[in-house]
Amino acid sequence: MEKSANLLQEKLNGETTIVNLKEETVPNIDAFDNIILGGSVYMGRTQKELMKFAKNNLQKLLEKRVGLFLNCAENTEKKYEQCKNCFPAELYNKAIVKGFFGDEITWEKCSFFHKLIIKKIKKSKESYSNIDMEEIAKFAELMNA
Ligand SMILES: Cc1cc2nc3c(=O)[nH]c(=O)nc-3n(C[C@H](O)[C@H](O)[C@H](O)COP(=O)(O)O)c2cc1C
């Protein structure tokens, strides 16, 4: 997810700030015109810190140009339903762009529990990256417009 955020930042115009909700305090969002929220999907859900941030700041976020993106393996129409479960409904409906940036696994960074699931499903212990650069570029173009 961090990689996607960095790749997206490179394509955005103007001044940008990346905040890791798991590790950093968020600056006052009043100062920002555009806000992009991004996470990754595990068992149909995104990171709890992201869901909490979206819920706690919903009214302010609804007044801004918002983009939402996810790193996820789902690549069919089901990805939209999945995305709806990751963000408050009003924010999902209001977002000017929703992006699905593909999936990757960095084996060394996975928790013990996630490794068990990956071994069962993929029958492999290999890291891989299917990041969709075109989707990131399209997303940035819409945010920059
Ligand atoms: C244990 C596990 C569960 C996952 N569950 C889902 C899921 O429910 N839906 C989906 O689209 N992708 C799912 N994925 C794929 C991840 O969203 C994808 O690998 C993503 O790139 C992980 O990003 P991160 O490593 O930056 O958190 C899952 C991956 C793992 C390892």
Image (cartoon, rainbow, N blue to C red):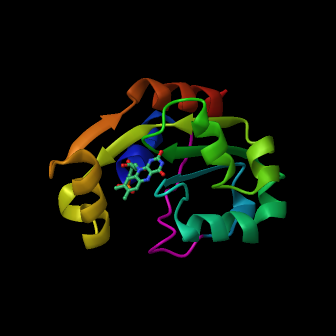
Identify the residue shown where x is 63% and y is 55%: 86
Residue 98 placement, left or right of 104: right
Quadrant occupied by the C terminus: top right
Magenta-drawn segment: 14-26
Q: Work out whether residue 11 can be spotted.
A: yes
Depicted 100 relative to depicted 47: above or below: above
Tell me, yes or no, whether the highlighted magenta stretch contains residue 20: yes
What is the tally of numbered marks visible in this picture? 0
Q: Which residue is at the front of the view, 108 or 140?
A: 108
* Residue 46, position as x, y percentages in the image: 54, 59
Judged left or right of residue 44, residue 5 is left
Q: Quadrant of residue 51?
A: bottom right
Please tell me which residue is depicted at 47% across the width and 32% down the height of the picture.
Answer: 136
- Name the residue at the left extreme: 125
Left or right: residue 29 versus residue 104 is: right
Residue depicted at 68% across the width and 69% down the height: 28
Q: Looking at the picture, does residue 22 appear above or below residue 105?
A: below
